[in-house]
Image (tube, rainbow, N blue to C red):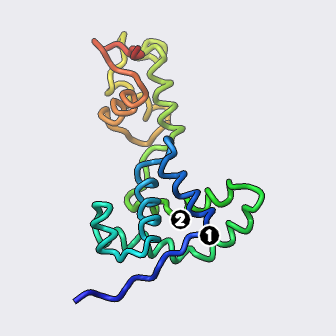
Amino acid sequence: MPGPRPQLIVLTDRQREMLVHLTRCTNSTQGLVRRARIVLTAAEDLNNEQLARELGIDRQTARLWRGKWLAAKERLEEAEEEASSSEKVLRECIEDVLSDAPRGGTPATFTPEQICRIVALALEEPGDCGRPVTHWTNAELADEAVKRDIVQSISPRSVGRFLGRGGFEAASGTLLAQQ
């Protein structure tokens, strides 16, 4: 037995144009494109089951984004009124409505500033820091970062990840920029 018919999404011409634009824009994220397609398809008077089948998504996902769009109806109308001279306001509002909620989890352990200071430290000569080595190792860098109060503690593995992420790689014990 089918459930109740979901509430219909009614799009204005400008909202529809903006959603179609987002689905075609090359710099839109895949998530944003998928959500814009969900809203556009939901406006075709499909129920969540049909919508899910049409787009190859889960029914709960269809229900979630239909609900988010409907919950933001007043906000979208206000943005559209405000955007009479500029499309930017409406686009930003639509992107905000279709954006992911902040993810839970633990906050980052190291600040971007700390990471930058560790990378800068890796560019210094170890001998200039009083280190009895000619080339930095991740363990030596971790120890020096703690010694300089850049961080309270850090593992050599974390140092290695920061250097690897930044385009640096330890090769034969020497820090080299990747070309």
Q: Which quadrant holds the N terminus?
A: bottom left
Residue at figure coordinates x 62%, y 57% from the top left: 92
Residue at figure coordinates x 46%, y 55% from the top left: 32
Q: Position of residue 67 (x, y in %)?
A: 45, 76
Residue at figure coordinates x 46%, y 30% from the top left: 118
**Tag 1, which secondary structure?**
helix
Q: Considering only vertical position in the picture, is 27 above or below 124? A: below
Which residue is denoted by mark 2 in the rendering? 97
Tell which tag, 1 or 2, sits nearer the viewer: 1
Q: Which mark is residue 76?
A: 1
Pick the front one: 3 or 96: 3
Q: Which quadrant holds the C terminus?
A: top left
N-term-proximal mark, 1 vs 2: 1
Query: Disc 2 residue type?
Result: Val
Q: Residues within 10 Å of mark 1 (few under 14, many from 20)?
A: many
Q: What residue occupies the far left of the structure in this picture?
A: 1
Q: Are marks 1 and 2 in contact (CB under 8 Å)?
A: yes
